[in-house]
Image (spheres, rainbow, N blue to C red):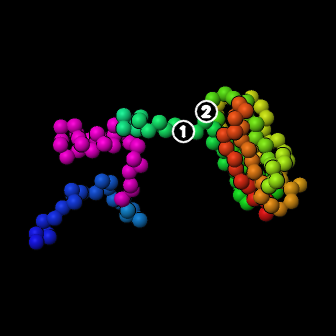
Amino acid sequence: MNVLGYTTGVEANDAPFKTSFPYLATPWAGNHICDCDENDPATSSRKAKIGNAAVFQGLAVAPPEMMATTSPNPFVGRNNLRYHLDEAAQVNIALFDAEGRQIKVLVNKQLKPGTYNQSWNGDDLIKGIYFIKVTKNGVVKQNLKVVKG
């Protein structure tokens, strides 16, 4: 049956083990440029599959134009809204109740590219679920659900 001669094709770890606790191999992120030797047949095929950027160009995947997070969630009084903008744009961020009524406008201004923090006070709100609508140049980019506890 030649069981001892069986191989999966993986003859070594693809990442070295750490030299301190927890002694685990850190997995590859999957987005690094392969440092394979193109003349080595064992590693050159791996480079074509993983390290070639052309593989990912056909996916038509782009990072979000605008990304927002809120913390803490659930919140009691104050809440912090953190958002990133990839290009200059008119930004409108508003808070709505569960029935869709606008409660507060948190941001309404023309902004340059960058990462922003907007702290806001929710002490005057009753306990419940609220929604934050993030708009860039009049187009809704994200909706966040926040819970007042």
108 versus 17 height, above or below: above
Res. 113 image quadrant:
top right
Position of residue 127 in the picture relative to residue 46 (left or right)? right
Asked whether residue 120 appears in the rendered view, the answer is: no
Residue 105 in picture, x, y percent from top left:
82, 41
Residue picked out by circle 1: 63
Q: Residues within 10 Å of mark 1 (few under 14, many from 20)?
A: few
Q: Work out which residue is located at the far front of the displayed protein and give it.
A: 99
Question: Measured from the top left, where is residue 6 in percent x and y?
Answer: 16, 64
For the residue pair 97 and 121, the one nearer the viewer reads as 97
C-beta proximity under 8 Å, tags 1 and 2: yes
Q: Which residue is mark 2?
A: 86
Q: Quadrant of the N terminus?
A: bottom left
Asked if the stretch drawn in magenta spans residue 128, the answer is: no
Number of labels in the image equals 2
Residue at 49% over, 38% down: 61
| Residue 30 included in the magenta stretch of the image | yes
| Position in image of residue 21 (x %, y %) | 41, 65
Q: Residues within 10 Å of mark 2 (few under 14, many from 20)?
A: some
Q: CA distance from mark 1 to mark 2?
A: 9 Å
**Measuring 66% from the left and 40% from the top, which residue is drawn there?**
141
Type of amino acid under label 1:
Pro
The type of residue carrying mark 2 is: Asp
Q: Characterize the magenta stretch by its predominant secondary structure.
A: loop
Q: What range of the chain is rendered magenta?
A: 25-52
